[in-house]
Image (cartoon, coloured by chain):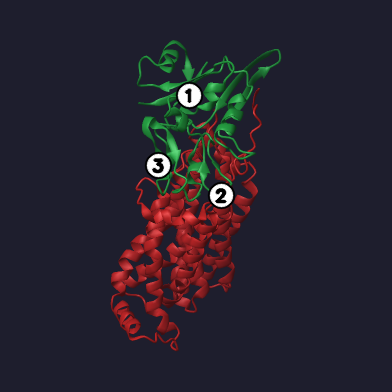
Amino acid sequence: MRYAMAIDTRKCVGCSDCVVACQTENNVPVGFCRDWVVEIVDGTYPNVSIELRTERCNHCDNSPCVRCCPTGASHFEDGGIVLVDHNKCIGCGACIQSCPYDARYSHPDGYVDKCTFCIHRVREGKNPACVSVCPTNCMHFGDLDDPNSEIVNVLKNRKFKSLAPEAGTKPQIFYLV
Amino acid sequence: MKEELFASGRNIPNIDPYLNIWHWQIPGYLFLGGLAAGILLFASFFTIMGKENKMEATVKKAPMIVPFALVLGLFFLFLDLKHKLYFWQLYTTVRYESPMSWGAWVLMAITPLSILWAASYIRELFPKWDWKYDILKKAEKWLIANRILMAWPMGALAVILGIYTGILLSAFNARPLWNTSILGPLFLVSGMSTGAAVIMLMSKDHKEKKIIGRIDILLIVVELFFIIHLFMGFLAGSEVQINAANLFLGGKFTAPFFAFVVILGLIFPAVLEIFELKGYKVPIVIPAILILLGGLIFRFLMVEAGQITRYLY
């Protein structure tokens, strides 16, 4: 089992519904977020291209955050989901430094927090909150090891990229371009 | 033209607009750890060479401050933790892949060892000191008889501690300025140089000062070479590494780095030490303090600048 996400940058309209859904679902403190939307504008008017994409923890296969954690608080769950055990986290900040995506933050309660792929929902067979609310249906979540899953199908038929693959982290969020 | 913005308005404290999660505590600890490692390395080296009576400040006096430096450094690390009450979790696991875990365990070993070392010399330096209990007196006798036995592991742990202060940063692939293996040796040499500066400040023996001064000049030369290598490596690297080097070669860290670290912290004190060796009267306080300040500022700049550097995507 290998959970992953495919995000269609050609469908995303940047409404930030995923961000709000995550904040509500996971009780993210005000002023913080586990996912966010970036807008990249390339070129000069009238020759401009825009890419919108929603970003979050990439639940990397070769996670520097899991490697550098001195207590084992950052760990892999089934399906490759990277989680932080709040009762083991000492808040040293090593994982925040190690993440090329700046996907982690220090929760006001002290521990480090980040996207969990909504593991509590996934275990019940539901999609993560961000995926389930997306009004343009631009996000696909699923198991890469299941040849019949929607995400495998999408990745087979579309061109995609991942963020900073040169960092060697083997990110598991794929952006359809 | 390429422009990137957060459409969802992200502004997380200490993460945006650029990472700033580590403040003064980390460079403060790196400085104290390096300094302690330097002193202990000299102390164990000259003990193993059988020179403890010729190098009094190196072997006996300077190690007295090491336990204080290490405990203060550990306290700084504790202050840096955001989930402080869980700090003991560090000592429930050994994680080979995590430099911070290594550091925690090395400190766990070297701090008590440095306390024992200081305790074995305390009556020699403070003759009025009384251990009061017989068992402590017996323990002291054993320690005094077995200093060589302590010196070997202490020297080895000091090298690991000194290198670790650099590896702690260099293990972070996501921060291009830190992600170079030369940082380990560079921080070790810099820590040894600050340790030598403390010894020179505490020594009253002209011969000892001369020996340590000579070693320090060599260390400074090696450190300068390492710094040149650091930037050469970056400039021959990928775009993010070139950007990292440019922070110090024309960017906003150029002036403090070259003024306070390279010139006032390394070249100028080395020149003063050379003059001293040639027989000119130079108060040793000046180069020693400059080296200490240079080492401290160097660590502050590296930690601050490293957090700004990042992958581009």
**Between marks 1 and 3 in the image, the one whose residue lies nearer the viewer:** 1
For label 1, count other residues whose C-alpha is less than 10 Å away and answer few (under 14), some (14-19) or many (20+): some
Extreme residue toward the front, this view: A124
Tell me the kind of residue under disc 2: Trp
**Between marks 2 and 1 in the image, the one whose residue lies nearer the viewer:** 1
Please give the name of the residue rendered at 32% of the width and 70% of the height, measured from the top-left corner: B150
Residue A48 to residue B98: above or below: above
Where residue B144 sits, quadrant-wise, is bottom left
Tell me which numbered mark, 1 or 3, is placed earlier along the sequence.
3
Chain seen in red: B
Look at mark 2 in the image and give the residue it sits on.
B22
Whole-Å distance between the Cαs marked 3 and 2? 19 Å
Residue B61 to residue A157: above or below: below
- Chain A as rendered: colour: green
Please give the name of the residue rendered at 41% of the width and 87% of the height, measured from the top-left corner: B130
Look at mark 3 in the image and give the residue it sits on.
A67
Judged left or right of residue A74, residue B251 is right
Tell me the kind of residue under disc 3: Arg
Q: Position of residue A20 (x, y in %)?
A: 61, 29
Extreme residue toward the right, this view: A45
Pinpoint the chain carrying mark 1.
A
